[in-house]
Amino acid sequence: MGLLDDLKQQADTLRQKEQVSQEEISQNLLLTHAKLKDALHYWVELFNSLNVIKPTIARVYYLEGGATRMENLRQSDYNVNGRRLTLDHKDYIEAIVLRFRCASEQKLTIEKQTDPLVQRMREHLWTNNLKFDLKEMRNERGYVERGIFTMNCEVPVMVTMIGDLENGRIKIVCKNLEKFGEFTNIYDFEEFNKELLEELGKVIIAQPNNFRSVGRHQESMRATATRPPRPLAELEPETRPPQAPQQQAPMEDVSDPTKSFLGSIKSILKR
């Protein structure tokens, strides 16, 4: 085979792969749209119910360092938004964004000494979308010696469900849900179902749940995190750690998965 024929064959093979990839992405877009369409209907119903019932859900958030916390924050203002993508004059749901806030009427004042600690607290508040005022005290050379942060006790919470078209999955990205920070769970299309939505709903209204462990990707990560170390007998004597008594982890309190979570919310509204 000549050089030109070889290059043409490689180009044809590459074009075929790209065509298959585009077909897969198109199929994944259709699956994502179907799954998120059902989910959007679920969340609109659930959040409309919560905005009527206004359940009392108190949260505690620990700020950077863990020494300071926001207490008795009440959840409210539940909002649902569907993000749409237009292709070939057709609209597809590419993501669902859930928002609510945890707040109290109190104000919080935090004082930090030295410039590094002030900078670290500022970054922590910015990263978690917290609004604040900062008063800096500087020395004669212009260096920050002390910083006083003043803020309302209000934490914005956001949960985004978005399709991963290249890998054929749906991701749920949670920010400030139950605690500061962001974490992402990944689900295959068949795993993204009403049972999963109800587990997430239980998280939002502070009911017992197993949301963080649902799905094979989460199970895989948990198995990796809890993988036992090599047996002591396989380690060299000088590398063996001291043995300590093991304690059995407490059993997780998980409610009956056959009971409809959204149905229980609706029954409250009918009373």
Image: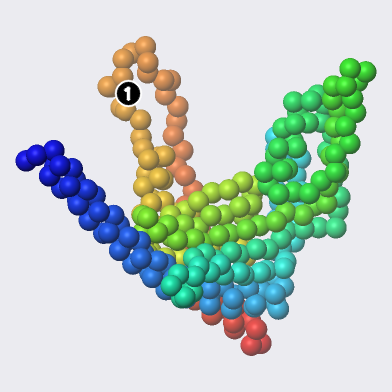
The amino acid beneath tag 1 is: Leu
How many numbered markers are drawn? 1
Horizontal and vertical percent position of residue 98:
61, 64
Q: Is residue 71 left or right of residue 270?
A: right
Q: Nearer the viewer, residue 202 or 215?
A: 215
**Residue 229, can we see it?**
yes
- Report which quarter residue 44 is drawn in: bottom right
Residue drawn where x is 50% and y is 58% of the image: 172
Element carrying mark 1: helix
Where is residue 187? Give x, y as percent: 41, 58
Label 1: few (<14), some (14–19) or many (≥20) C-alpha neighbours in 10 Å:
few
Query: Furthest-top residue in view?
Result: 238
Residue 25 on image: x %, y %: 35, 61
Q: Which residue is mark 1?
A: 232
Is residue 195 visible in the rendered image? The answer is no
Determine whether, in the image, residue 208 is placed left or right of residue 163: right
Q: Kindly identify the residue that appears in the image at 59 percent across and 82 percent down.
A: 266
Q: Seen in the image, is 131 located left or right of residue 4?
A: right
Instruction: Identify which residue is drawn at 75% across, 37% down.
Output: 122
